[in-house]
Image (cartoon, grey):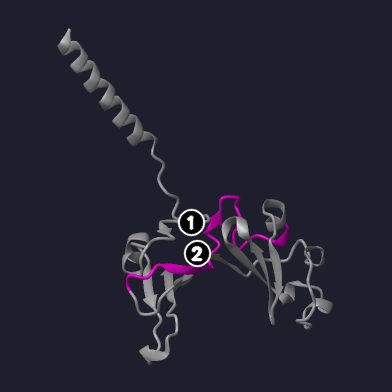
């Protein structure tokens, strides 16, 4: 009887292990969420970026003067095109984590299918807009739910909204068809 329980226990453990291995979902390399972009996570250090982008080119943009205290961006290229720009929290520190990620490629999509091919209406239909900032050449639509900000070129806006930075632009003033130029995730 004792051997029967040992065999049953081994069988149950093997079944659980095999079930967990086969049901584990592989991470989509282009999925954007509050805490990760593909394999890049909000806790990953600069020195480990090759793990998140094994087939892409990682280009560290550095200033000539290392004592300027400037944050040094890291560009990620795939197939010759820049797809992301990463900004570390600390300049010139390989143990620093990433503070923000500028998403330039339309391959990257949020859980609600928003990408650089999306429009203002797509953002509005899928997320609660937290704020809209009026900048010199663009408006920035912030969505706190995913720590994102979507940049829309002012060329997408009516002419009366393009040149006055003091205007308080409301969501109803932005055309539904206004395209996203790029978006950022902030960690």
Residue 149 visible in the picture: yes
Q: Residue furthest bottom?
A: 65
In the rendered structure, which segment of residues is drawn in magenta?
94-121
- Per the image, the residue denoted by label 1 is 35
Q: Is residue 119 magenta?
A: yes
In which quadrant of the rendered view does residue 75 lie? bottom left
Q: Earlier in the sequence, mark 1 or mark 2?
A: 1
Report which quarter residue 127 is drawn in.
bottom right
Q: Residue at x 72, y 56 (%)?
A: 124
User: Which percent across, then down, holds residue 71?
Assistant: 44, 80
Q: In whole angstroms, how far apart are the C-alphas of marks 1 and 2?
A: 7 Å
Tag of residue 122: none
Report whether 172 appears left or right of 143: right
Crowdedness near tag 1: few (<14), some (14–19) or many (≥20) residues, C-alpha within 10 Å:
some
Q: Is residue 59 left or right of residue 36?
A: left
Which secondary structure, mark 2?
Answer: loop
């Amino acid at each position: 009887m004792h051997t029967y329980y040992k065999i049953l226990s081994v069988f149950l453990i093997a079944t659980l292990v095999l079930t967990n291995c086969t049901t584990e979902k592989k991470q989509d390399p282009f999925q954007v969420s509050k805490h990760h972009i593909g394999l890049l996570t909000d806790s990953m250090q600069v020195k480990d970026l090759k793990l998140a982008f094994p087939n892409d080119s990682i280009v560290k943009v550095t200033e000539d003067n290392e004592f300027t205290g400037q944050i040094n961006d890291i560009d990620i290229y795939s197939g010759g095109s820049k797809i992301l720009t990463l900004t570390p929290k600390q300049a010139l520190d390989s143990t620093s984590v990433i503070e923000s990620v500028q998403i330039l490629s339309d391959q990257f999509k949020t859980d609600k299918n928003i990408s650089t091919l999306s429009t203002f209406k797509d953002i509005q239909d899928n997320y609660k807009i937290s704020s809209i900032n009026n900048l010199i050449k663009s408006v920035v639509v912030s969505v706190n739910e995913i720590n994102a900000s979507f940049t829309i070129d002012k060329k997408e806006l009516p002419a009366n909204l393009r040149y006055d930075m003091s205007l308080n632009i409301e969501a109803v003033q932005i055309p539904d068809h206004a395209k996203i130029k790029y978006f950022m995730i902030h960690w």
